[in-house]
């Protein structure tokens, strides 16, 4: 029986996909499975490189599967000696590095639960998550040590090169005995420190269902050299950027340090990566760097997630890397449900589209009464799970060929004088101006129209009335005469979530606060 990794066409994906064939990709079964064994130990004898850590300041580091298997086993023994038990939480606040991967897979081998935490969290963000998941141990670096130790009752260990070297005499093998349905990872989504989203609790068997996104969302296949520059503190960087490709035995790239688009472009060329999945913001920053044409590239597949990509950036990707960039849509809670099948020669990628459903998936655009919307009509994007339709909290529409198009978050819709406008479509139009680098659109109160559009623009040109009129005329001509930003504010930067998405909610809160102060 052929494995799913041997098929590359869209038609074969529809014909041959089954849940059982996902399980056939692993050593474990429906009763017993361990993420660390599947991602690391079973590839230890391959002789392949596991991770290339791309550093912002240079000096990249390569870690082999053998090194990662041995060191994570030694770390698992150290955890057991320290009294860590299956089911207990261990928080990991480290940048991608040898220490991070050794800690992550060492924790998972023991049956304890790994909790990755974003390294840029301040005391409040860290304290909220620590109080929520109640870890018995936090592994971090010297830079975060003082902040971590300020949290009362938290056991903190600095995991640096010296600490790893001290484990050398411990055994380099560790037997994994976890059940497939045992919890393995707690994942926090990128909410604000004032409103903490509940941790999504993943079991070891999540790795199996993840492979749907790996096969059809990022197009992973044996032999790929894959890179995802998103932080492994978030779902994209950890599940799609780390666990999925390592489970296939691929060589992966990870970014560490302050993001630098020119340095990333250099590394993409130097390490000959053939497959990349990144946030739309990453691609946009690569475009804005002006360094795209400096290097030769070796890509065969490209994908993105997190938010829609604007047309100008999509054009840059195509001309620079030689391939269409494929959208992959999903949420931390429901997984990936819409894909563009990167690498499938018989699948037409439509620019701006979210693609079509994954094999075996059920997705619909529905109206307020739950009826399917006809092509071209915007409605609620719904996913069917266990016989129940689940609201993604996003809006979308389909075309006559069954492709889905994102129309913004449900709370990002702007209704002005009875007209419904999408913040995403407005931003896409604004970004077509050659002097605009970033843009965000929100609705602000208006006595006559209820709401009007206000755009926040980051540009490489000085603000002026003429510039504002150019932006407004561009949007009118692209969308509709009534659909344009009546207010334009030029700013140095846009607020973003830790995952790199534009944080429109922060903009709305700022506007509300400013309006309240003005009224007072």
Image (cartoon, rainbow, N blue to C red):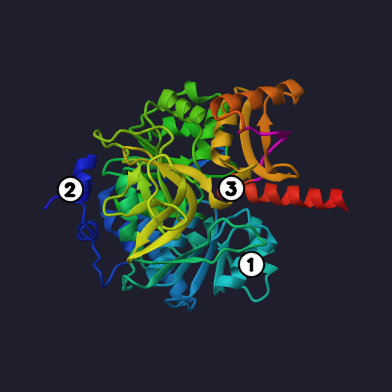
**Picture disc at residue 128:** 1
Q: Compared with residue 335, is residue 482 higher up or lower down, i.e. above or below?
A: above
Q: Which residue lies at the image location 45% right of the left edge and 70% below the top edge?
A: 113
Q: Nearer the viewer, residue 376 or 212?
A: 376
- Quick check: is 493 in the magenta stretch? yes
User: x, y (%) of residue 427?
Assistant: 58, 35
User: x, y (%) of residue 415?
Assistant: 61, 45
Q: Which residue lies at the image location 32% right of the left edge and 59% below the top edge?
A: 209
Camera-side mark, 1 or 3: 3
Q: Secondary structure at mark 3?
A: helix
For disc 3, the marked residue is 412
User: x, y (%) of residue 196?
Assistant: 60, 64
Magenta segment: 483-495
- Quick check: is 33 in the magenta stretch? no
* Disc nearer the start of the sequence (2/1): 2
Residue 248 appears in the picture as rendered? yes
Work out how far the residue at label 3 is from the one at label 2, CA to CA, in angstroms.
Answer: 38 Å
For disc 2, the marked residue is 15
Residue 425 sits in quarter: top right
């Amino acid at each position: 029986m052929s494995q799913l990794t041997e098929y590359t066409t869209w038609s074969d994906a529809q014909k041959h996909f089954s849940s059982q064939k996902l399980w056939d990709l692993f050593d474990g079964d429906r009763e017993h499975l361990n993420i660390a064994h599947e991602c690391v130990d079973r590839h230890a004898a391959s002789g392949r490189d596991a991770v290339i850590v791309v550093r912002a300041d240079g000096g990249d580091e390569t870690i082999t599967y053998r090194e990662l298997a041995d060191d994570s086993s030694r770390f698992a023994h150290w955890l057991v000696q320290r009294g860590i038990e299956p089911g207990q939480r261990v928080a990991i606040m480290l940048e991608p590095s040898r220490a991070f991967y050794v800690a992550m897979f060492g924790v998972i081998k023991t049956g304890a639960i790994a909790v990755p935490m974003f390294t840029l969290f301040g005391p409040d963000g860290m304290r909220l998550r620590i109080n929520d998941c109640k870890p018995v141990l936090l592994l971090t670096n010297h830079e975060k040590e003082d902040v971590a130790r300020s949290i009362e009752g938290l056991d903190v260990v600095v995991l640096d090169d010296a600490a790893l070297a001290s484990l050398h005499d411990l055994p380099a093998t560790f037997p994994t005995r976890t059940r497939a349905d045992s919890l393995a990872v707690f994942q926090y989504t990128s909410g604000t420190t004032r409103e903490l989203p509940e941790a999504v609790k993943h079991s070891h068997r999540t790795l199996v269902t993840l492979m749907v996104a790996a096969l059809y969302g990022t197009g992973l296949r044996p032999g790929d050299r894959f890179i995802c520059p998103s932080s492994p503190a978030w779902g994209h960087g950890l599940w799609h950027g780390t666990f999925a490709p390592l489970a296939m035995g691929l060589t992966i790239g990870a970014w560490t340090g302050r993001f630098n688009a020119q340095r990333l472009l250099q590394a993409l060329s130097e390490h000959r990566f053939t497959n990349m999945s990144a946030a739309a913001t990453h691609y946009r920053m690569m475009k804005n760097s002006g360094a795209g044409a400096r290097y030769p590239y070796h890509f065969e597949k490209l994908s993105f997630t997190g938010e829609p990509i604007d047309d100008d950036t999509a054009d840059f990707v195509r001309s620079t890397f030689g391939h269409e960039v494929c959208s992959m849509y999903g949420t931390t809670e429901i997984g990936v449900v819409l894909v563009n099948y990167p690498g499938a020669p018989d699948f037409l990628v439509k620019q701006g589209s979210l693609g079509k459903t994954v094999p075996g998936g059920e997705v619909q655009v529905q109206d307020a009464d739950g009826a399917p919307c006809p092509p071209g009509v915007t409605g609620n994007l719904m996913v069917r799970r266990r016989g129940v339709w689940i609201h993604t909290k996003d809006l979308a529409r389909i075309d006559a060929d069954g492709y889905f198009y994102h129309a913004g978050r449900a709370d990002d819709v702007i209704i002005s004088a009875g007209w419904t406008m999408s913040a995403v479509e407005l931003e896409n139009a604004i970004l077509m101006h050659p002097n605009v680098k970033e843009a965000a659109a929100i609705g602000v109160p208006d006595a006559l129209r209820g709401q009007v559009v206000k755009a926040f623009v980051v540009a490489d040109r000085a603000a002026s009335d003429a510039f504002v009129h150019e932006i407004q005329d561009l949007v009118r001509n692209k969308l509709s005469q009534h659909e344009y930003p009546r207010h334009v504010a030029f700013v140095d930067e846009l607020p973003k979530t830790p995952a790199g998405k534009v944080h429109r909610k922060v903009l709305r809160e700022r506007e509300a606060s400013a309006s309240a102060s003005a009224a007072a």
